[in-house]
Image (spheres, helix red, strand yellow):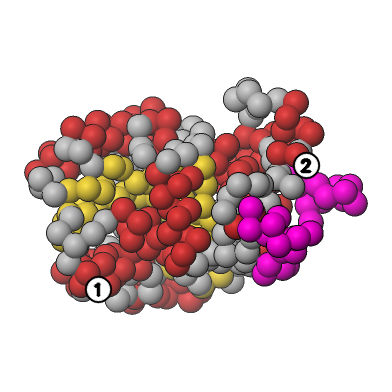
């Protein structure tokens, strides 16, 4: 039985008219003949058939039906369908982690001799994946400055097949002009993939701006409470629905049904959570801008952000990752981090709990010092993923941490 057969609400309204709050709760609702209200988890590796002929027809794709949970699982498919719709895509393939999503996309699309053009402002593991593992397959890797369209223009080669970006970037919140870069990529016969982890479809829909693929680490805001790892690739029916799906079916970096269920529940509250995270982040960014120990605050909501206007144009919200530099380098940054009590010292982000990170020695600690400098990850930089605690409590915590670090 396909999800569509089980999904009376989805069949009532196939239009694009629902808002993100409604889509996140109601699109592709999974319902078995037991008529459970909350979606069921299907923890099964395989499925049974009434006859050998039915099995044969199902395996050959001549009749609809589940085959094997590496590539057909009802809970995973419900999550894929809902996220695809929220991103404005035709198809979605869920993966075991965000990194598995990036690996899956690259291995599906590229072969030896191709060129991958990536943003300098990427998640540390993504840079490591490209430099240490993808490069050794004979795929060329190049980098461009996210905010500089001329740097992108100069980065293309005749064999460029894929452009990979994050916007806003981690941790510096540098923006890529998705529409301009998509146009440039297509002129060069390349596809554009956007890691939409920081904003989620609630605040940004890269496919609607011309991107060809959206990649997610569902581990972050989609889960929203730091429980499960997972990822996804969203795009059109051919390139994701057939090509990426074909790789998943064979190679198997797939999402577990339990994790898919957690993410389905996460999507139900994504819209309200993203807005609450963002409201606090904007307040925190303002407050940080007024603190003497802070030399620089990076958040697209600030008029001082070099791409504030672009953020207003291409995003529906500014997001909740706020980075700032404290005077005094690593020692000062570590003292501030150690003196907080409410913030969790962890590399994760997108959690209900506010997290505080020193990127230079954690998330970006394994890339070379030169790459770190080029990416602008200084020793005084601190990244905060603003959670859902009361903003007054968060500010009080940081105020105390600043005064400790200043020796007050
Ligand atoms: C965390 C993260 C990833 C990797 O996702 P995992 O689920 O941890 O594998 C990729 N991109 C960005 C922007 C991230 O923050």
Which percent across, then down, holds residue 285?
45, 47
Tell me how far mark 1 sits from mark 2, CA to CA: 44 Å
Which percent across, then down, holds residue 286?
45, 44
The residue furthest front is 53
- Residue 202: give its label: none
Kind of element beneath mark 1: helix
Count of numbered circles on the image: 2
Q: In this view, does 52 lie to the left or right of 274?
A: right
Q: Residues within 10 Å of mark 2 (few under 14, many from 20)?
A: some
Q: Which quarter of the figure has residue 387? A: bottom right
- Are circles 1 and 2 on residues that touch, CB within 8 Å? no
Of 87 and 222, the residue lying toward us: 87
The residue pinned by badge 1 equals: 132
Asked if residue 52 lies in the magenta stretch, the reply is yes
Which percent across, then down, holds residue 182?
28, 35
Q: In this view, does 151 lie to the left or right of 190?
A: left
Asked if residue 30 lies in the magenta stretch, the reply is yes
Q: Quadrant of the C terminus?
A: bottom left
Q: Is residue 396 visible?
A: no
The residue pinned by badge 2 equals: 6
Tell me: residue 384, above or below residue 92: below
What are the residue bounds of the magenta stretch? 29-57
Tell me: residue 230, above or below residue 136: above
Tell me: residue 383, above or below residue 153: below
At 31% across and 75% down in the image, what residue appears?
Answer: 365
Q: Is residue 248 visible?
A: yes
Kind of element beneath mark 2: helix
Which percent across, then down, holds residue 352?
63, 58
- Does label 1 or label 2 sit earlier along the sequence? 2
């Amino acid at each position: 039985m396909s999800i569509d057969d089980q999904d009376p609400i989805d069949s009532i309204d196939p239009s694009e008219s629902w808002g993100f709050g409604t889509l996140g709760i109601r699109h592709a609702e999974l319902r078995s003949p037991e008529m459970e209200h909350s979606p069921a988890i299907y923890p099964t590796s395989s499925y049974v058939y009434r006859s050998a002929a039915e099995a044969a027809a199902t395996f050959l794709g001549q009749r609809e039906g589940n085959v094997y949970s590496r590539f057909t699982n009802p809970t995973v498919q419900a999550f894929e369908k809902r996220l695809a719709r929220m991103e404005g895509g035709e198809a979605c393939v869920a993966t075991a982690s965000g990194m598995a999503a990036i690996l899956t996309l690259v291995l599906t699309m590229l072969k030896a001799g191709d060129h991958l053009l990536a943003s300098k402002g990427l998640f540390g593991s993504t840079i490591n994946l490209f430099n240490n593992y993808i490069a050794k397959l004979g795929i060329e890797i190049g980098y461009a400055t996210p905010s500089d369209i001329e740097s992108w223009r100069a980065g293309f080669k005749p064999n460029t097949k894929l452009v990979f970006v994050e916007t806003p970037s981690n941790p510096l919140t540098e923006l890529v002009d998705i529409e301009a870069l998509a146009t440039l990529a297509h002129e060069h016969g390349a596809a554009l993939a956007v890691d939409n982890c920081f904003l989620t479809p609630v605040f940004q829909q890269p496919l609607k701006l011309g991107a060809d693929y959206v990649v997610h680490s569902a581990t972050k805001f989609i889960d929203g409470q730091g429980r499960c790892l997972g990822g996804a690739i969203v795009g059109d029916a051919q390139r994701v629905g057939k090509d990426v799906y074909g790789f998943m079916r064979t190679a198997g970096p797939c999402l577990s049904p339990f994790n898919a269920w957690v993410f389905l529940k996460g999507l139900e509250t994504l819209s309200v959570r993203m807005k609450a995270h963002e409201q606090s982040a904007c307040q925190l960014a303002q407050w940080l801008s007024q603190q003497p120990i802070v030399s620089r605050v990076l958040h697209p909501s600030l008029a001082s952000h070099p791409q504030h206007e672009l953020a207003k144009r291409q995003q529906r919200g500014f997001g909740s990752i706020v980075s700032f530099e404290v005077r005094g380098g690593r020692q000062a940054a570590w003292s501030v981090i150690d003196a907080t009590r409410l913030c969790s010292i962890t590399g994760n982000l997108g959690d209900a709990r506010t997290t505080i990170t020193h990127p230079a020695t954690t998330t970006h600690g394994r890339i070379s010092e030169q790459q770190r400098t080029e990416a602008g990850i200084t020793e005084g930089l601190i990244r905060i993923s603003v959670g859902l605690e009361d903003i007054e409590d968060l500010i009080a915590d940081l105020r105390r941490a600043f005064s400790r670090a200043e020796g007050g």
